Amino acid sequence: MSTSSDEDLADIFQAHADPDRAKSMRAYMKNQFQYYGISSPLRRSLCRDYFQIDQYPTTVELPELVDQLWQYDEREMQYVGADLIRRLVKKQPAAFIDVLENLILRKSWWDTVDALSIDAGTLMLRHPQLQPDTTNRWVNSEHLWLKRAAVIHQLKYKDATDWELLQDYILQVCQSKEFFLRKAAGWALREFSKTNPAQVKSFLGKHRDKLSGLTVREGSKYV
């Protein structure tokens, strides 16, 4: 049984707070979140030391711990949650998709949403029954960040990519004026082009008139 505590982590981070760095981190994230001012390497080092003593959360404990981490104003606490999920997601049951969706919808911005989206993709590979219903629902939702998650959840799939599904999602969002959706479409194409450049090149040529300049620039980087 783990003894990991969000309060213990908060105390450790507070002891290493850097107000000057926190100010610049807030500015970079458009003042949407508070920060302790802890760099990513230091955060990971502090967490590694902490969890070596107090153990990583179990499969059962992880949902409650990440929920608690998402309640903090300081963004580093959400980063800890995202790091834990990345480490442990392959051990989670299919029902963990509900936890990921809930977190995508909370304190949403690209820094956490992108990590959670890729983790959702990992979980879906482990539990194929989740697809395509989950991401079909996401891409058809009214929520920007669920749509983005649907488009990019296959980023790490390589040969396992469902190309037909990816094309469908890109075409569903390609007319959006939302920067984060146009960027996501291009990012997904760019990543898949590393596996199958010919298919991406053909797609870009066929649908160039529908795609934004941003999507085309991102998607054609390697083709």
Image (cartoon, rainbow, N blue to C red):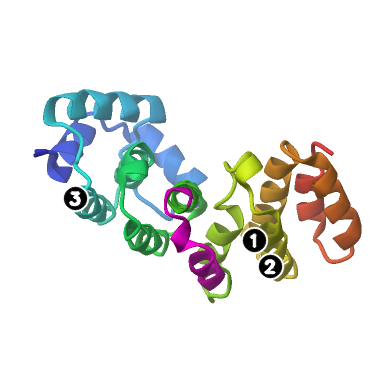
Q: CA distance from mark 1 to mark 2?
A: 7 Å
Q: Which one is closest to the eye, mark 1 or mark 3?
A: 3
Against 21, residue 212 (above or below) is: below
**Looking at the rendering, which quadrant does residue 159 occupy?**
top right
- Magenta stretch prevailing secondary structure: helix
Q: Which mark is residue 181?
A: 1
The amino acid type found where label 1 is placed reads: Leu
Query: Which circle's residue, 1 or 3, is located before the other in the chain?
Result: 3
Packing grade of label 2 (10 A; few <14, some 14-19, many >=20) is many
The amino acid type found where label 2 is placed reads: Val
On screen, residue 139 versus residue 191, left or right, reads: left
- Identify the residue shown where x is 85% and y is 43%: 198
- Judging by the rendered image, the residue that carries numbered circle 3 is 60
**In front here: 78 or 120?**
120
Q: How many marks?
A: 3
Against 111, residue 22 (above or below) is: above
Is residue 62 visible in the rendered structure shown here? yes
Q: Position of residue 66 (x, y in %)?
A: 26, 50
Q: Secondary structure at mark 3?
A: loop
* Residue interval drawn in magenta: 125-138
Q: Which mark is residue 156?
A: none
Q: Is residue 129 magenta?
A: yes
Against 59, residue 206 (above or below) is: below
Query: Which circle's residue, 3 or 2, is located before the other in the chain?
Result: 3
Q: Are marks 3 and 2 in contact (CB under 8 Å)?
A: no
- Identify the residue shown where x is 31% and y is 43%: 91
- Judging by the rendered image, the residue that carries numbered circle 2 is 173
- Identify the residue shown where x is 26% and y is 25%: 48
Q: Quadrant of the N terminus?
A: top left
Q: Are marks 1 and 2 in contact (CB under 8 Å)?
A: yes
